[in-house]
Amino acid sequence: MRSRWLGWALLVAGVLGALWLPNGLYPAVAVDMLCWALFAVAIDLLLGYGGLLSFGHAAFWGTSAYTAGIIAARLGTPFPVAVLGGALAAAALAVPIGYLAVKRTGIYFAMVTLAFAQMVYFVANEWSAVTGGENGLQSVPRELFGLDLSDPYYFYYAALPIAALGLLLAWRVVHSPFGRVLTAVRDNPARARALGYPAHRYKLVAFVLSAFVAGLGGGLFAVAHGFVSLDVVHWTTSGKGVVLVVLGGIGTLWGGVVGAALVVNLEDQLSQAGFTLIGLVTGGIFVIVVLLFRRGIWGTVAQLLRRRL
C-alpha cells in the first residue's frame, strides 16, 4: 500500500514538474528535454526490457525528423500530424532493419544496427533534393490550426501532450503481457521458445515500437528547432541516447527521462558559461555514475526507496 501511494506521489510530482519546467528553465531547453527523454525511453525499451543494445537508433530519430520536417514544410499540416507521420515512417523503416538485426545478439546486434544507421546517414547526405544534404532541411514551421507557436514557451505546452502519450505508450508496453514475455525472452530466450513464444517476433515488435517512440522525439525535435541537419542521423546521436539511459538506469524506463533532463540542462549551462569541451564533462560524469551507481541514478534511488518500504 505504501509503495502504491509513493508511486502516485512520484507521478503527481512528475506532472507538476513537467508543467513548471518552462518557467524555471529556458523554454527551448525544456522542449529539448522532452525530445531527448522520448529518445532515451525508446532505447531503454529495447535495451532494458529486450536486452538489445542498439547503436543505430539515430536512423529512426533522423528519419522521423526529416519526414516530419518535409510534411510540415511542404504540406502545411499541423505539427502533431507531421510528428505522427515522422514516427510512422521511423516505425516502417524499423521493420526491415529489425527483421535482419534481431537474428543477432550482443555486439553483433549493435554492429548491425550501426551499419544500417550509417546507410541512412549516407542516403540523407546524398539525397540533397529531398533532405537538403549538408545544408539541411530549413524553415520547418510550427503550424497548429492558426495558433502562433513561434514562442518556445507556448510550443512546449503544445508538445507536452505528445511527449506524455509517447511515455505512456512505453509504460503500457512494459507493463503489458507482451512486456512480461519480452522480459522473459531477454532473460532466457531458449526457455521462452520452449514455452511456445516466438522470440524473434517479440524482439521485432519491440524494435518497431522502440523506433516509433524514438520517432516521436525526432519529429518534435525537428519542429522545435525549425531545422533538420545531418547531425540527427549521425552515429553520435545514438551514442548520446545510450549514455542517457545508462546515467538514468537501464531497465527503469523513467531513468531515461532523468538522464535526459540532467544532460540537456548541463549542456545548456556549460554552453552559456562559454565552456567548449562539453563532452569531456558529460563523459566524466558518465564514468563516475557507472562506477558509483551501477543501477544508474534513478535505478539507485528506486532501489533505496524499495528497501525503506
Image (spheres, rainbow, N blue to C red):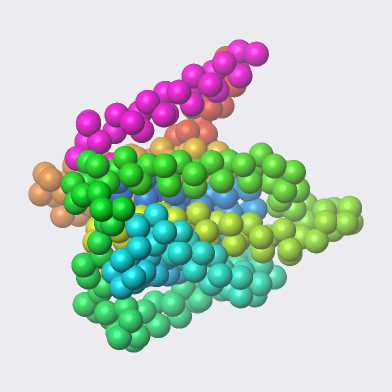
Residue 224 on image: x %, y %: 27, 54
| In this view, 172 is above or below 135 | above
**Of helix, strand and loop, which mostly describes the magenta segment?**
helix
| Residue 45 visible to an observer of this rendering | yes
**Residue drawn 63% across the image and 46% down it:** 173
| In this view, 177 is above or below 63 | above
Front one among 155 and 12:
155
| Residue 218 visible to an observer of this rendering | no
Front one among 29 and 49:
29
The magenta span reads 1-30
Residue 115 on image: x %, y %: 50, 76
Residue 80 on image: x %, y %: 39, 54
Question: Could you tell me which quadrant the N terminus lies in?
Answer: top right
Front one among 149 and 200:
149
**Residue drawn 34% across the image and 70% down it:** 75
**Residue drawn 43% across the image and 45% down it:** 163
Front one among 122 and 271:
122
Q: Is residue 42 left or right of residue 105?
A: left
Residue 34 on image: x %, y %: 36, 45
Q: Tell me the quarter of the picture where residue 30 sits.
A: top left
Q: Residue 251: within the magenta?
A: no
Q: Tell me the quarter of the picture where residue 156 sits.
A: top left
**Residue drawn 74% across the image and 43% down it:** 177
